[in-house]
Image (spheres, rainbow, N blue to C red):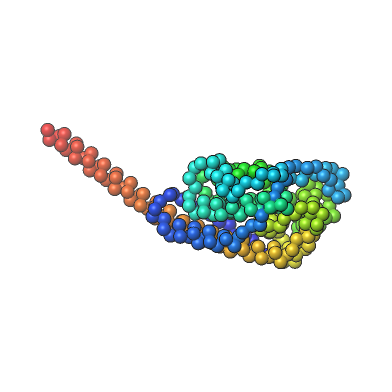
Amino acid sequence: MAAIASLSFSAVSQCSERKATVQSARTLASNSEAFRFRTNFSCHYVGVRSSGSTSPMAIHCMSVSTDVPTVSETKLNFLNTYKRPIPTVYNTVLQELIVQQHLMRYKRTYRYDPVFALGFVTVYDQLMEGYPSDEDRDAIFQAYIKALKEDPQQYRIDAQKLEEWARAQTASSLVEFTSREGDVEGMLQDIAERAGGKGSFSYSRFFAVGLFRLLELANATEPTILEKLCAALNVNKRSVDRDLDVYRNLLSKLVQAKELLKEYMDREKKKREERAETQKANEAVTKCLGVYQYAGQ
């Protein structure tokens, strides 16, 4: 399986001349319609023991709320938390994603899991790579997750833990988590049990991206490994294949948008340089004329 292509967006300024970029954002938004997620629900930390393990394992989920907010309320929470303007090409996709994730987040069967977190973090980092400010990029992430009444730190912690674990795996050991002990193995065993019908589990495309990321980091490129991993987790491989195709198409659209952004920013930079040179020349002429007039008095 081919590795995910990395994206790099140039900085964008809010400007009426950005016709090509805005058009790209609109196209990207329409294409991301296919990246719809399903409705989900949430639940807080509970302590359980993984099968065959003597140490308790924390299953990370958020508290159940009987008062389900509307999509508008979630979007408003995001805007109230992060008040700075976001360049259009980023904001268009972020608004689309937060609507989709809201529907998934408040589905009755939703339960947070680390593979899901890894998938979202992967999508977010791919989308926001090259954002004008690293500090703002992190602040947007914080505001986005908090708007959904979840913990952004837990997303990052679990994603990092899974990434570090996957880097230490081989293609064969990746799918042998059922017979081993460990924090990540326990997380995956819990997911497998819930997906097998012993608890709440709601499959999503973020989950599919999380699986892909595990395979990528473990250098498990053989298609049969994905099939074995899906079987071990009790997840439908056909759904995973379909959703990964959608994800790749989305990345392709993001790359196109990045190229348009780069062209736009190159033009803007050239215009600013030309204006600066013109201003310097005018100031030099004005200064010379002033000195000449003073000398003639």
Between 129 and 196, which is closer to the camera in this rendering? 196
Q: Quadrant of the N terminus?
A: bottom right
**Where the C terminus falls, by quadrant?**
top left
Residue at image coords 51%, 54%: 92
**At x 66% / y 55%, what residue is drawn?**
39
Residue 40 against residue 157 in the figure, above or below:
below
Q: Is residue 227 left or right of residue 88?
A: right
Of residues 27 and 172, which is closer to you in this image? 27
Left or right placement of residue 80 versus residue 240 in this view? left
Asked whether residue 62 is in view, the answer is no
In the foreground, 42 or 82 = 42
**Image point 59% across, 50% down: which residue?**
71
The spot of residue 174 in percent (x, y) is 77, 57
Q: Position of residue 197 (x, y in %)?
A: 80, 57
289 relative to 226 in the view: left or right? left
Q: Quadrant of residue 137?
A: top right
Please provide percent x and percent y for residue 186.
Answer: 80, 49
Image x and y of residue 216, in percent: 68, 58
Residue 85 higher or lower than 9, as above or below: above
Foreground: 3 or 52? 52
**Left or right of 70: which side holds 160?**
right
Q: Say whether residue 208 is visible.
A: yes
**Residue in the image at 33% along x and 46% along y:** 276
Task: Identify the residue at the far front of this view.
Answer: 67
